Image (spheres, rainbow, N blue to C red):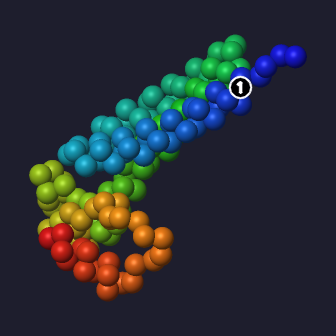
């Protein structure tokens, strides 16, 4: 019996690609003043991995490269979607970043409150509780 490792490789590439993409988009968007630079880098790397996935004879490397490549292409868009979440107050703004300082000044919903930095309790928070948490963080 021959063992097929393509599924395992694809699963690992998906898990680590999505995890790393999520963490890096939040961190890079928070620190970067000009979003087009990291977006262009992510796009170029993603496109490069897609081309490499098409050209490699290895099925495992092709699957992994293709999955990570598509994830990077998606991350290139996520930088701008993350900025929209900051404007709506769904993600924390960094007041030390000039781009975020302008967002905080121009968008009343924008906040430095991190909605992910709270204890989960297994039930939904009421709007009053959410407003209280956000007000307490200012």
Q: Which residue is mark 1?
A: 6
Q: Nearer the viewer, residue 130 or 119?
A: 119
Residue shown at 54%/32% (left/top)?
Answer: 69
Quarter of the image holding residue 116? bottom left
Residue 28, horizontal then vertical, whole percent = 29, 42
Q: Nearer the viewer, residue 39 or 23?
A: 23
Q: Is residue 88 above or below residue 26?
A: below
Q: Nearer the viewer, residue 69 or 23?
A: 23
Q: Nearer the viewer, residue 62 or 92?
A: 92
Residue shown at 23%/43% (left/top)?
Answer: 32
- The quarter in which the N terminus is drawn is top right
**Residue found farthest to the bottom:** 128
- Label 1 secondary element: helix
Q: Neighbour class for label 1 at 10 Å: few (<14), some, many (≥20)?
A: some
Q: Is residue 67 left or right of residue 121?
A: right
Can residue 106 be seen here? The reply is no
Can residue 82 be seen here? The reply is yes
Residue 136, horizontal then vertical, whole percent = 18, 74
Residue shown at 50%/36% (left/top)?
Answer: 17
Quarter of the image holding residue 27? top left
Residue 117, horizontal then vertical, whole percent = 31, 60
Q: Is residue 120 left or right of residue 113?
A: right
């Amino acid at each position: 019996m021959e063992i097929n490792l393509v599924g395992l490789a694809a699963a690992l590439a998906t898990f680590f690609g999505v995890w790393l993409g999520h963490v890096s988009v939040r961190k890079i968007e928070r620190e970067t003043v000009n979003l087009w630079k990291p977006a262009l880098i992510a796009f170029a790397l993603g496109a490069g991995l897609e081309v490499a996935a098409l050209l490699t004879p290895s099925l495992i490397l092709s699957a992994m490269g293709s999955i990570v490549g598509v994830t990077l292409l998606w991350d290139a868009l996520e930088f701008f979607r993350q900025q929209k979440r900051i404007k709506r107050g769904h993600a924390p703004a960094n007041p030390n970043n000039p781009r975020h300082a302008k967002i905080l000044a121009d968008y009343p919903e924008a906040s430095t409150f991190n909605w992910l930095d709270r204890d989960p309790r297994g039930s939904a928070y009421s709007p009053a509780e959410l407003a209280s948490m956000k007000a307490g963080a200012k």
